[in-house]
Image (cartoon, rainbow, N blue to C red):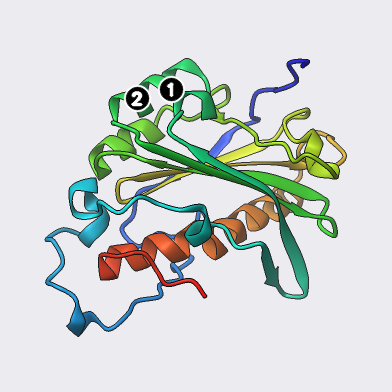
Amino acid sequence: MAVVIIAAVAIILVMTRPGAGTPAAGTSPTNTPGTKGTSPTPPAGPWEYIGSRNTDPVPLTLVELYPAVITSAGGTYKRATEDHGKNCHGSLIGSALQTAVRRAGCTQELRATYLSKSAKIMATIGVFNLQSFALAKKAATKAGRSEFVAQLPAKTGPAQAIGQGTGLEEALVKGHYLVLVWAEATNLSAPPSTKAGRARFSAFMSLLVKRTVNVSLSTRMVDGRPPKRH
């Protein structure tokens, strides 16, 4: 298999604000809390239950993180493929990021690739289950131009080619979880250099985080348990 991964153009943002659910500044998280009165008192600290894996011990699942389809403002974003495992090292590009995640005690990696044919953008999003917020925050600082999530190609369709062009990356931390997103154009062209063009990519990535992993992680933060999926 030919090596076709090219370095990210830039890391746009590392979010470490409590409650920051998406990489877009000023955007509120999508919380889906249950009845707080039925839950034990959450641990002290801004991240409540997800400040540490010790208070959030239930492993993540693909079902809770990645819906098959996301819709927003008439646009449809379909999940092209997904994967999970314990090989955190193999799901990252770049030795500095790999080392930081290993030292942070990574026990899970869960990735999915989404495709928007109308927007002509595809993206891989990955969640890494680390020991604590402090270690996740430290690991996020290693993400950059040559340190990013390994793209997850689909078996068919345009998303087969993800990773064959340059892209934009965003990194964020929510509790003890590190979230990395890589996005690129479906025609493999270079990311747009204009402000408007980059804003379109950023909006896609922000929506992806908000409608996927943020739902589950916000529920875990507030309720101390995964959300119920129907």
Instruction: Determine the residue positioned at 62% across, 52% down.
Output: 205
Instruction: Determine the residue positioned at 24% across, 39% down.
Output: 134
Q: Residues within 10 Å of mark 2 (few under 14, many from 20)?
A: some
Counting from the top left corner in percent of width and height, residue 69 is at 68, 65
Tell which of 222 and 54 is nearer to you.
54
Counting from the top left corner in percent of width and height, residue 47 is at 25, 58
Secondary structure of the residue carrying numbered label 2: helix
Tell which of 85 and 120 is nearer to you.
85
Q: Are marks 1 and 2 in contact (CB under 8 Å)?
A: yes
- Mark 1 — residue? 98
Tell me the amino acid under the disc marked 2. Answer: Arg
Tell me the amino acid under the disc marked 1. Answer: Gln
Tell which of 212 and 136 is nearer to you.
212
Residue 176 appears anywhere in the view: yes
19 shown above or below 106: below
Q: Quadrant of the N terminus?
A: top right
Tell which of 176 and 60 is nearer to you.
60
* Quarter of image, res 227: bottom left
Q: Which mark is residue 53?
A: none
16 shown above or below 217: above
Residue 125 appears anywhere in the view: no
- Mark 2 — residue? 102
Secondary structure of the residue carrying numbered label 1: helix
Counting from the top left corner in percent of width and height, residue 91 is at 53, 29
